[in-house]
Amino acid sequence: MEQVYALGVSCIELVQYWLGDYGEYFKFVNHFSNPHYVMEVLFPLITILDSVFASQLIVCLSFGGWMNAVMKWWLLEDRPYWWVRETTFYTNTNRPHLHQTSQTCETGPGSPSGHTTTAASVLILAVMWMSHICNDRKWNLWWWKYFTYPLFGFALISVMFARLFVATHFPHQCLLGALLGLFLAPALCIYVTDPFIWRYSTHATMPASQAMIWHVVCAIIAILISVVTYYSLVLFGIDPHYTVKLAFRWCEAPDNIHVSTTPMFALVQCTANLLGCALSVSPALAEYRHNTKNRSLIISIFATAASIYAFKQLEENIPRASAFKFYMLQFILNMARPALLLRLVPALSLWPYSGQIKQKVN
């Protein structure tokens, strides 16, 4: 791997040299492709527009984030900004210097890239959503693909270059992350999805209670795989948090290190969201999309904004003295997010029109 890493460092040097004037653009791209940002801001905003697209998004983000974090512990690859300082591949006279930014100091193993996984999933979901709008609803906008596909490619390549620019990933890690996101999004939405919304899976005829149990079992299996992975590393004498120590050692500005970049935090957040989604499985999940004329967007906007603010305040006030309490409270908070935004807020926005909806059903 040393030769692969060295080649990657050369690519990063070229990106930093030739695209140095685009630092602010790459900073913007890195921020908006951050899985933490997408989960906390983009997902709630999407719930206002389309509950089905939002549920697809949270499932793909949660499962993709879980898979990404577990694979990081499976592969245990380095990140460029610390590898270039730790390796004996170079001598002290020819050791490259990689420029660091405020977004460089991520703490987990490097492969695959979580930002590119998230970006690929979100972008392909957006294409699927636009296909539904432009084709399934018979708008007959034949030209939308010629506009969307090039934009899709440009956005994904921008995220990959942004990760290289801040020296937090090697090129092959970005490519693996992109392939993972491109595969997971359609696979989850077509084959392993909520049976009451898309009706593609083999579980489409399940009663609501049985479907919920099936989804909860799947979420619990994901949690168990995370626990087994963690303690397998410990059993083989590998510190699961050794990359955090490397980040603190070689990050030029340790104040830029955030707990949200650790695999442990990602696993807690993603498995909690998966369990929250599993508990929200119901035919009512799709009612918000189908009752476009019988819902209050004003109620939905204000309730969602209040939810975002409340979650932000609660997260900032979680005590950090005890790691167990911190992660337990994070788990509870993230488990509540899908239930609140996919069930309670849509129900509130449909409530003023409940009489009309009942007449429509009858």
Image: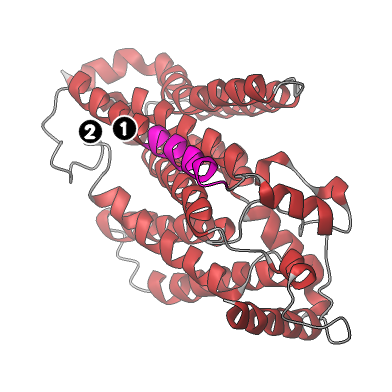
* 85 to the left or right of 128: right
Q: What residue appears at the point 57 percent right and 43 percent down from the top-left corner? A: 42
Task: Determine the secondary structure under disc 1.
Answer: helix
Viewer-proximal residue, 129 or 234? Answer: 234
Q: Main secondary structure of the magenta part?
A: helix
Viewer-proximal residue, 66 or 138? Answer: 66
In the rendered image, which residue does mark 2 sit on?
196
Q: Which colour scheme is used?
A: secondary structure
From where the camera sits, is residue 275 visible? yes
Q: Which mark is residue 77?
A: none
**Residue 68 to residue 162: above or below:** above
Q: Which mark is residue 286?
A: 1
Q: Where is residue 119 in the image (x, y as percent from the top left)?
A: 53, 59
Mark 2 vs 1: CB contact within 8 A = yes
Residue farthest top in this picture: 355
| Residue range highlighted in magenta | 222-237
Viewer-proximal residue, 347 or 123? Answer: 123
